[in-house]
Structure formats: structure tokens, C-alpha cells
Image: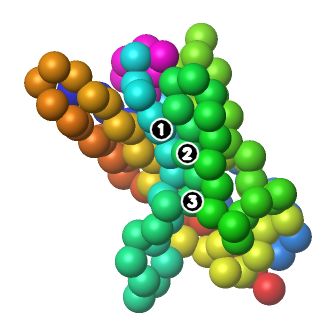
Amino acid sequence: QVQLVESGGGLVQAGGSLRLSCAASINIESINAMGWYRQAPGKQREFVAGITSASRTNYIDSVKGRFTISRDNAKNTMYLQMNSLKPEDTAVYYCNAYLYRNTGEHAYWGQGTQVTVSS
């Protein structure tokens, strides 16, 4: 069982920056992959950025060069540094953790944190 808690959301102006945090209840080195998803009003949840236990990262094209995903293993926390924010980045951002164990595949989600970017 993995508990994930997001924080750091808020209201910012276009061009501003925000750093989201996702604190995990277990050693994140034991998590195969973590990532950030977002869901805007009226839209389906979409993948934004991910990072594996081997530090491989992946981003959707719309955030490349603006967002940076990282983790601090000592703090069991994953971050999403969001720069040059645009109104279209407005969404609820969710932390995700994916684990593969001998019990099977398991995915966990945080409660979400609201990011609002004003124009």
C-alpha cells in the first residue's frame, strides 16, 4: 500500500512558475515509476511527465523545456518544476506511482492539487 500526497498547487499568472511535490509513504526507490498526470475541466486525465527508478524521464511535447520532473530519494518525494506556465496548463495535477511486485501490477494516485494559470 502506497500513500501519495501532492502539494504546491496554486494560482499563478501566465509565465510564472510553480513546483509541485508528491510525498510517498514508502521508499520511492522501491517504486518502479512515478509520474504526474493532469485533468482539465471537461477533459480526460492525461499523462504529463514520468520518471523511473533508474531516473529515466519522459514528458509530453507540450511541456518539454518548461517542466522538469525530479525526485529526492532521501525525502521520498517527487517534484514537478513548472516554468513558463500557460493558461492551458490549468488542471488538477495528480501524482501517480506504479509498482510491479510478485503480487502483480499496482497503481496508486494522490488526491490531486489544483494549478490555475491566469492570462
Q: Is residue 77 above or below residue 15?
A: above
Residue 92, can we see it?
Answer: no
Give the class, few, some or many, for how many residues have Cα within 10 Å of label 2's Cα (few <14, many ≥20).
many
Extreme residue in the left direction:
103
Residue position marked by numbered label 1 in the rendering: 34
Residue 98 pos. (x, y %): 35, 37
Q: Quadrant of the N terminus?
A: top left
Relative to 102, does residue 64 appear above or below in the rendering?
Answer: below
Give the Cα separation between the discs numbered 1 and 3: 11 Å
Separation of marks 2 and 3 at Cα, in angstroms: 7 Å
Q: Residue at x 33, y 46 (%)?
A: 109
**Quadrant position of the C terminus in the picture:** bottom right
**Looking at numbered disc 1 in the image, what kind of residue is underneath it?**
Met
Q: Position of residue 7 (x, y in %)?
A: 55, 45
Dot 2 lies on which element? Answer: strand
Question: Which residue lies at the image location 76% right of the left edge and 76% below the top edge?
Answer: 86
Looking at the picture, how far across and down is residue 81, in whole percent? 74, 47
Which class describes the residues within 10 Å of circle 3: few (<14), some (14-19), or many (20+)? many
Residue 49, horizontal then vertical, whole percent: 59, 52
What type is the residue that disc 2 sits on? Gly
Q: Residue at x 78, y 68 (%)?
A: 85
* Residue at point 41%, 28% (across, down): 32
Secondary structure found at label 1? strand
* Bounds of the magenta segment: 24-29
- Asked if 76 appears above or below 4 in the picture, the reply is above
Task: Tell me whether the residue at label 1 lies in contact with that at label 3, contact meaning CB atoms closer than 8 angstroms.
Answer: no
How far apart are the two marked residues, 2 and 1, measured between alpha carbons?
6 Å
Residue 27 sits in quarter: top left
Query: As shown in the figure, which amino acid type bears the numbered disc 3?
Result: Val
**Residue beneath disc 3:** 48
Residue on which the image places disc 2: 50
